[in-house]
Image (cartoon, rainbow, N blue to C red):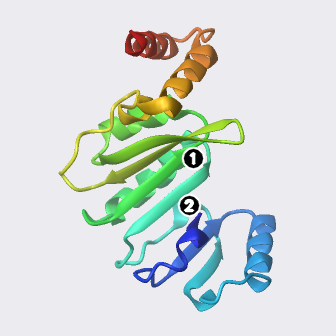
Amino acid sequence: MGLSFIDQPAVKQIHLVDPSEDVIKVLKNKLIDSYITKKEFVSVHKLKGQEIILNPESKIIFIAGMGGKEIGEIITHLLPQLSPEDRLVISPHRNILELRKQLHLSDLNLVDETVLKEEGQFYQIICLSKSSIGPKVSLYGSKIWDGVSGKEYRQHQIRTFINHQDQASRDFVAHLKQLSH
C-alpha cells in the first residue's frame, strides 16, 4: 500500500515496516527488481509496529494486513506520537468490533471510512485523526453501510455474526438488521 504513493509529489519518504524477516526480504527484492525510480525515498524496516518511533514530519500512517487486536496495540503505542495534522489509516482483517470499541473510547476521531471488496473479501478502511474535528468513531461504523458495497457488506456481516453467542455480536446483528429497514 505504501508504495502506491511513491509518485505523489508531496511524498518525501515512505517507510515499510513488518516484523517478519521473510516479508522484509520479499519487499527488498521487489524494490531492487521494480520500476520505481524514487527508491531512495523508500526504507524497509524489520520492526514490530509497537516499536515504531514516528518522524515528527509524519503525516499519513497506514496500518493494514493484520487483526484488530494487533492494530489496537500499535495505535496505543503511536497515539502519544501523533499530531492533530497526522492521519492514521487502518484496515483490520479481524476483531473489528473490539477494535472499534477501543477507537470509540480513544482520543481519535473519524475522518472518513469506507468498505472495499476485493477478490471476494471485504475490507473496512478507516481514516482517523487526533484532531478534535470530526465525530467519535462509532461502534459499528456509519458510512461503511452506504452504497452497493455497504449493503452487500451488511448482509455478509449479518450472515457471519448471526450464530455468535456473545452479547456484542448479537447487538451488532440487531443494529445491522435495523439498518436494513
Give the mark nearer the N terminus: 1 vs 2: 2
CA gap, disc 1 to disc 2? 9 Å
Q: Quadrant of the C terminus?
A: top left
Residue pointed to by mark 2: 49
Residue 139 has which mark?
none
Q: Residue at x 44, y 52 (%)?
A: 75
Residue bearing mark 1: 70
Kind of element beneath mark 2: helix
Q: Amino acid at mark 1?
A: Glu
Question: Could you tell me if the residues under marks 1 and 2 are in contact, i.e. CB atoms within 8 Å?
Answer: yes
Image location of residue 9, percent across then percent down: 43, 83
The quarter holding residue 57 reads bottom left
Q: Going by the image, does 29 lie left or right of 41?
A: right
User: x and y percent of residue 107 in the render?
Assistant: 27, 47
> Residue 161: percent from the left, percent from the top?
58, 16
User: Disc 2 marks which amino acid?
Assistant: Gly
Residue at position x 35%, y 31% in the image: 142
